[in-house]
Image: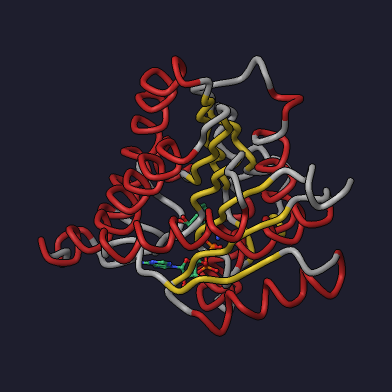
């Protein structure tokens, strides 16, 4: 695929975990990408790795998804580099493990600012820039379906339940613009978000034992699910949740 014809994608959360794996998978498939993350160093490392492996067609942009003006500027910067926008993947997110009775309103708000409002603004800004239609994939979690119960708790589960509903609402709203919106709901996936918890063998075994495949996913396994949902081959799919959880919720 030549650079001029390559599909283009913005991926948030590209510095780490599922977002980084998604940049690499899309790059492997011939996309040009713009990664957006709070952490510039990490996003640059991902873009560099993609460039080294698949060619110089990737950039990294620093932005906090909760800072609306900065995020809009980052989307402008990304569009300038990409030329046009085909795909958005919203993987920027934060985990939260405070026990329910200790959970403060400030923490609840902070988690939802990133996971829900940050996702919303990214979808809106991407849709404004998708001149020829497009495909969007958000990242929810089995926590949004089950109401938590793995590592994340109340604020996290509520935020991911909101991402599931937001995705379906966006699928309805953006269909007339030729834009499909789906979500992937990972189960336990070995990234920096859960690495610390996974050092506790008993906890890891308890969570893995809840899934029929009795294992933890790798970030790349979630990335290939995302890459399918944003591919032209997924043309009949919108408003869907692809549960990639080793058979944990059997949704
Ligand atoms: N790892 C899991 O087990 C798991 C399971 C289900 C869902 N998820 C979801 O997958 C998504 C990716 O998580 P991950 O496991 O790759 O975690 P991660 O911590 O490895 O990556 C998250 C990335 O988001 C970025 N980020 C956080 N807040 C941001 C902000 N305000 N603005 C911009 N970037 C920000 C971080 O810098 C980081 O690079 C998250 O939405 C997470 O909730 C993860």
Task: Please indicate whether residue 113 sits to the left or right of residue 79 in the image.
Answer: left
In this picture the colour scheme is secondary structure
Depth order, front residue of 33/194? 33
Residue sitting at 50 percent across and 46 percent down? 139
Q: Where is residue 42 drawn, in percent x and y? A: 58, 80
Residue sitting at 61 percent across and 19 percent down? 237
Q: Seen from this angle, which residue lies furthest left?
A: 105
Q: Where is residue 123 drawn, in percent x and y? A: 41, 41
Q: Seen from this angle, which residue lies furthest bottom?
A: 41
Give above or below for 224 relative to 230. Answer: below
Residue sitting at 83 percent across and 48 percent down? 29
Residue sitting at 51 percent across and 55 percent down? 91
Task: Please indicate whether residue 115 sits to the left or right of residue 133 in the image.
Answer: left
Task: Please indicate whether residue 1 sits to the left or right of residue 69 in the image.
Answer: right
Picture quadrant where residue 126 is located: top left
Q: Where is residue 93 drawn, in percent x and y? A: 42, 60
Quadrant holding the C terminus: top right
């Amino acid at each position: 695929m030549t650079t001029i014809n390559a599909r283009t994608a913005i991926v948030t959360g590209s510095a780490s975990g599922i977002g980084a794996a998604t940049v690499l998978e899309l790059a492997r498939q011939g996309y040009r990408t713009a990664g957006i993350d709070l952490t510039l160093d990490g996003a640059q490392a991902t873009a560099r790795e993609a460039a080294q492996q698949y060619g110089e067609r990737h950039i990294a942009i620093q932005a906090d998804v909760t800072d609306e003006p900065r995020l809009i500027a980052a989307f402008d910067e990304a569009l300038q580099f990409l030329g046009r926008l085909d795909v958005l993947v919203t993987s920027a997110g934060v985990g939260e493990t405070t026990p329910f009775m200790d959970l403060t309103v400030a923490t609840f708000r902070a988690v939802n600012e990133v996971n829900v409002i940050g996702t919303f603004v990214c979808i809106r800004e991407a849709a404004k820039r998708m001149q020829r239609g497009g495909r969007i994939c958000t990242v929810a979690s089995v926590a949004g379906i089950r109401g938590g119960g793995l590592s994340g708790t109340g604020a996290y589960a509520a935020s991911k339940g909101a991402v599931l509903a937001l995705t379906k609402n966006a699928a309805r709203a953006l269909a007339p613009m030729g834009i499909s919106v789906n979500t992937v709901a990972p189960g336990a996936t070995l990234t920096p978000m859960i690495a610390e918890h996974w050092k506790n063998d008993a906890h890891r075994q308890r969570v893995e034992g809840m899934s029929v495949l009795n294992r933890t996913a790798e970030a790349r396994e979630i990335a290939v699910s995302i890459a399918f949902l944003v591919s032209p081959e997924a043309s009949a799919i919108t408003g869907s949740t692809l549960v990639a959880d080793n058979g944990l919720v059997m949704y």
